[in-house]
Image (tube, helix red, strand yellow):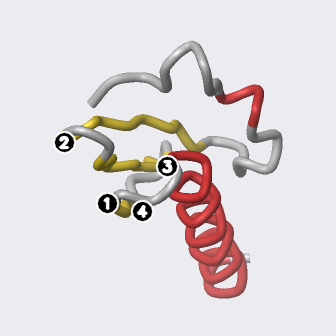
């Protein structure tokens, strides 16, 4: 997977949780696979022909949910 293209960067998404890395891959023309990977190991991923920015926002939402669950479980 590649880092986000110059048209969208991590700076465009200040809500990405700390410790998560954002990558993407264009699987076919206009179909993207977006992944957020935590430095702790968990990953969230989505694939679709939707707007790349929307796919990133979906991953951010899921990553935040994982962080909340881990915080509740381990403090």
Horizontal side of residue 6 vs 41, given as left or right: right
Label 4 residue SS = strand
Q: Nearer the viewer, residue 73 or 31?
A: 31
Name the side, left or right, on which 26 lies relative to 8.
left
Q: CA distance from mark 2 to mark 3?
A: 22 Å
Of residue 6 and residue 50, the one placed in the foreground of this image is 50
Q: Residue 33: x and y, percent?
A: 31, 49
Q: Mark 2 and mark 1: span between their CA atoms?
A: 9 Å
- Seen in the picture, residue 69 relative to 30 is either above or below; the reply is below
Helix, strand or loop for disc 1: strand
The numbered mark, 4 or 2, whose residue comes first in the sequence reads 2
Instruction: Identify residue for label 1.
Output: 47
Q: Which residue is mark 3?
A: 38
Asked if labels 4 and 3 touch by Cβ distance under 8 angstroms, the answer is no
Give residue 66's position: percent from left, percent from top. 57, 74
Name the residue furthest front: 29
């Amino acid at each position: 997977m590649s880092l986000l293209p110059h048209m969208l960067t991590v700076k465009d998404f200040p809500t990405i949780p700390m410790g998560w890395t954002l990558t993407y891959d264009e699987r076919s023309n206009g179909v993207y696979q977006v992944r957020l990977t935590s430095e702790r190991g968990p990953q969230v991923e989505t694939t679709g022909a939707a707007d790349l920015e929307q796919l990133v926002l979906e991953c951010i939402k899921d990553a935040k949910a994982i962080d909340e669950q881990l915080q509740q479980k381990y403090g």
